[in-house]
């Protein structure tokens, strides 16, 4: 048994994507099977297997995926970002308000959304990297600011982006086109870019190294502050991207919300194999993690439970994944 | 001679690979101040840790107050009356003096803490010691000297019979030291047994009755302070036989250009008015005892810590070094004494560590790293430095100390550093690898690099350096050519009496 497991771990494919990721993919299939069996039993007769459910789960996976990709950079540097959910909502509110009330062109509003995210990321990154504030506190504070700014900008009104038939609604094709999951393609593309940045560029190398030993990197003559700040900028920017995919799927955004998505994005990261201690991160793991989070929520709703169960499970996943990470590091030492 | 309060005999303690204490003996009498001296690593701290139960002993006996004892924790030792006043004070700044003294055994009335009663008790303690401190003052607002007095008061409140002072004067001003001595004399008159650990020769002469000198984990001997000279003590401290042959003559030609000049450098308490020159192809040894300010000097030159004043010249040109980035740009590399914290990124592999200081060079268009080039260079340096590793993908955390050090050396060589600062280059490295590091350093200077080597090991200093600078309390106290340097001369300069 042990030998067989070792042999499996040594397969080229398994080594390439990591054993943890293989397990996660298996978990996706297990979950799918689990929901397929249980849904008809619990909701007498209704079925889980259906194309719309897959699309609906993917809708959820996109924006959680983008948020997760962003926060992966921050966690790689040894920090944390609790502001991404509200920043995403703030981006969607401001850009949506510009679109519907000021009638600005759609492409420009998408730009605004990303810019708002980048701005929040820059502010957070500045305080963490240059002013040495703990990232926990900084992002908590920015979470409040983002919630407030979104509400103020829209005068506490919710914003509804144009419906599918309306003019300037092509943004919805980013998510779904002719019932095909275009969003999934874009998520994979962005994830690929993120992977290149994290593993193949100087920026990514520095981020991972400073997450592992910041002082050693600084004493090697690297301006650690710049690169640490960049991680937060990426996180914010991707929150701005996530906003487009959120409204592309659900059109309406309400002010003052968004914090539950932080935890789901962070859960996607840590279960994907990104270490909370910093220094090691998996882009592929984050994407798979996002899909698991989304599938879980779809399953919970399909089985007739309230969304509150999702919160409980996400919390437990974070506890479990981080415990596993810490235990595996202890074993290695 | 008074009645003996503490006798340690034949104490033996080994750690993996180190015989830290080799049948060490120490005897302290009531009403005696007994100095414990020795170089760094001589075993003083280990001996005190064995006494207070932090370490268990492998052999030997401790007789305290007439009976055999074996403490298994500092708490037990404290309860029995053996207390250490630490060099670094463990105080809670936001609590009052009295609250600090009685922490963990607060006076209470019902469920409530009785501050008034504690203040009274503290006041009484201070009266005994003839100290003027308000028990209601917040600890954080006191000077270090006064905090230390509170620590002494705390020791007495534990009904101590033996008080150990571990380099108590290191952080004190001259007047505070006088105060401390006054209190120690009070304690002596009250028949406490006192162990006084210090490097400062003049203090030893001033305050202690006997001196026990340790070297390389052994007791060299015990002298009566009044009957012995400073030279006697220094000779006992350094009188080891050096197996490795020291350098007899400098290898640097007299006309070698100065590559680094530091003038009147000041940075905090530990770097005062430091000036020196480093020549091309030279190994400049920085000797001194722990806390002499050598690492602080190196860090200030390297830009890791802030300089208050002073100038740095490289190849005769004045340069501004405000951060490690500036230093690296000027071709300086710093190899820290604490490799794991400041040298390597443990969770990353050899390639990533080796190119960390000059990754910019390996970047192609669009910030992409040219991994072929960086692997090629890393492989070359792994071979050249004879780094023992299964492959360049190996995580640095899986390498031995000596090989980690080689990775750090590779990092600075790849980034073309010409001036290398080795801070305790062989600390935590086994004997065989030590030899390799020495050979490597000799090779580097032969190739025209220049090296500053900070070392607390006298044989290492004498063996490697072309010139030796000795520091003490943040100042340079002596400079020798290796031809004229001796252990005695260096130790004399390192334990120099404080200039008044």
Image (cartoon, rainbow, N blue to C red):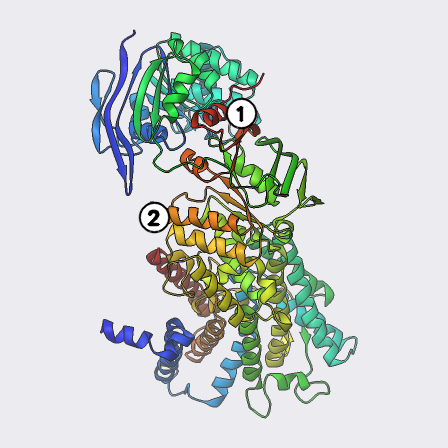
User: Which residue is identified by label 2?
Assistant: B432
Percent coordinates x, y for residue B452 in the rendering: 53, 42
Determine crowd level at label 2: few under 14, some 14-19, many 20+ residues with C-alpha closer than 10 A.
Answer: few
Per the model, the C-alpha gap separating discs 1 and 2 is 43 Å
Label 1 marks which chain's residue?
Answer: B
Q: Considering the numbered disc 1 on the image, is that residue within a helix, a strand or a loop? A: helix
Q: Considering the numbered disc 2 on the image, is that residue within a helix, a strand or a loop? A: helix
Residue A95 position (above or below residue A213) = below
Is the residue under label 2 in contact with that under label 1 (CB below 8 Å)?
Answer: no
Would residue A16 appear left or right of A115 to someone viewing this image? left
User: Which residue is identified by label 1?
Assistant: B144
Would residue B111 appear left or right of B27 to someone viewing this image? right
The residue drawn where x is 52% and y is 17% is B177
The answer to which of marks 1 and 2 sits earlier in the sequence is: 1
The residue drawn where x is 22% and y is 15% is B66
Percent coordinates x, y for residue B159 in the rendering: 34, 17
């Amino acid at each position: 048994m042990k030998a067989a497991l070792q042999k499996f771990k040594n397969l080229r494919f398994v080594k390439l994507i990591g054993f943890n990721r293989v397990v996660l993919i298996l978990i996706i299939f297990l979950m799918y099977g689990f929901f397929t069996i249980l849904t008809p039993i619990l909701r007498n007769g209704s079925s889980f297997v259906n194309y719309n459910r897959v699309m609906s789960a993917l809708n959820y996976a996109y924006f959680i995926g983008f948020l997760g990709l962003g926060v992966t950079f921050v966690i790689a540097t040894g920090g944390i970002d609790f502001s991404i959910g509200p920043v995403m909502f703030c981006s969607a509110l401001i850009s949506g308000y510009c679109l519907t009330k000021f009638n600005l062109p759609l492409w420009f509003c998408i730009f605004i959304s990303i810019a708002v995210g980048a701005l929040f990321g820059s502010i957070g990154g500045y305080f963490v990297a240059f002013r040495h504030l703990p990232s926990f506190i900084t992002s908590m504070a920015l979470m409040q600011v983002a919630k407030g700014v979104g509400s103020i900008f829209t005068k506490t009104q919710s914003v509804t982006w144009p419906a599918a038939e309306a003019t300037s609604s092509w943004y919805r094709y980013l998510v779904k086109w002719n019932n095909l999951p275009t969003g999934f393609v874009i998520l994979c593309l962005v994830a690929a870019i993120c992977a290149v940045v994290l593993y193949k560029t100087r920026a990514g190398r520095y981020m991972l190294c400073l997450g592992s030993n910041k002082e050693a990197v600084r004493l090697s003559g690297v301006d650690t502050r710049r690169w640490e700040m960049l991680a937060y900028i990426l996180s914010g920017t991707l929150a701005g991207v996530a906003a487009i995919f959120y409204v592309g799927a659900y059109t309406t955004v309400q002010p003052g919300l968004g914090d539950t998505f932080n935890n789901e994005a962070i859960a996607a990261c840590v279960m994907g194999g990104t270490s909370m201690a910093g220094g090691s991160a998996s882009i592929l793991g984050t994407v798979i993690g996002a899909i698991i989070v989304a599938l879980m929520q779809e399953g919970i709703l399909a089985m007739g439970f309230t969304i509150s169960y999702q919160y409980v499970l996400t919390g437990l996943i974070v506890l479990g994944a981080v415990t596993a990470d810490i235990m595996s590091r202890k074993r290695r030492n | 001679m008074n009645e003996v309060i503490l006798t340690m005999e034949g104490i033996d303690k080994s750690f993996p690979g180190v015989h830290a204490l080799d049948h060490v003996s120490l005897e302290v009498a009531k009403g005696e101040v007994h100095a414990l001296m020795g170089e760094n690593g001589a075993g003083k701290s280990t001996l005190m840790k064995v006494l207070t139960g932090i370490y268990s002993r492998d052999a030997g006996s401790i007789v305290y107050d007439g009976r055999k004892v074996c403490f298994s924790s500092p708490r037990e030792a404290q309860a029995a009356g053996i207390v250490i006043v630490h060099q670094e004070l463990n105080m809670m700044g936001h609590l009052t003096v009295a609250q600090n003294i009685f922490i963990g055994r607060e006076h209470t009335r019902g469920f409530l803490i009785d501050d008034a009663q504690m203040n009274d008790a503290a006041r009484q303690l201070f009266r005994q010691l003839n100290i003027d401190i308000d028990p209601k003052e917040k600890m954080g607002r006191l000077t270090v000297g006064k905090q230390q007095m509170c620590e002494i008061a705390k020791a007495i409140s534990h009904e101590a019979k033996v008080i150990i002072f571990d380099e108590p004067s290191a952080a004190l001003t001259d007047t505070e030291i006088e105060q401390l001595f006054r209190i120690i004399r009070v304690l002596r008159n009250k028949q406490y047994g006192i162990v006084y650990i210090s490097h400062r020769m003049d203090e030893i002469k001033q305050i202690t009755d006997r001196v026990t000198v340790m070297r390389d984990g052994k007791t060299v001997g015990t002298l009566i302070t009044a009957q012995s000279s400073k030279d006697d003590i220094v000779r006992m401290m350094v009188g080891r036989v050096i197996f490795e042959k020291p350098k007899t003559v400098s290898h640097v030609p007299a006309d070698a250009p100065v590559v680094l000049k530091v003038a009147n450098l000041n940075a905090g308490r530990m770097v005062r008015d430091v000036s020196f020159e480093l020549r091309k192809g030279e190994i400049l040894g920085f000797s001194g005892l722990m806390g002499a300010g050598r690492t602080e000097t190196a860090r200030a030159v390297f830009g890791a810590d802030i300089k208050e004043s002073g100038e740095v010249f490289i190849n005769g040109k004045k340069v501004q070094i405000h951060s490690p980035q500036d230093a690296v740009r000027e071709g300086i590399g710093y190899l820290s004494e604490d490799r794991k914290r400041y040298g390597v990124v443990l969770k990353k592999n050899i390639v990533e560590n080796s190119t960390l200081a000059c990754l910019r060079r390996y970047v192609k268009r669009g910030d992409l790293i040219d991994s072929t080039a960086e692997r090629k260079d890393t492989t070359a340096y792994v071979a050249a430095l004879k780094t023992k590793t299964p492959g360049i993908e190996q995580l640095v955390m899986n390498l031995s100390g000596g090989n980690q050090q080689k990775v750090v050396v590779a990092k600075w060589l790849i980034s073309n550093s010409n001036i290398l600062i080795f801070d305790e280059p062989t600390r935590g490295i086994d004997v065989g690898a030590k030899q390799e590091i020495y050979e490597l350093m000799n090779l580097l200077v032969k190739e025209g690099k220049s090296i500053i080597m900070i070392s607390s090991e006298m044989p290492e200093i004498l063996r490697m350096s072309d010139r030796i600078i000795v520091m003490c309390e943040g100042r340079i106290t002596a400079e020798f050519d290796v031809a004229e340097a001796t252990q005695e001369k260096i130790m004399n300069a390192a334990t120099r009496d404080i200039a008044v």
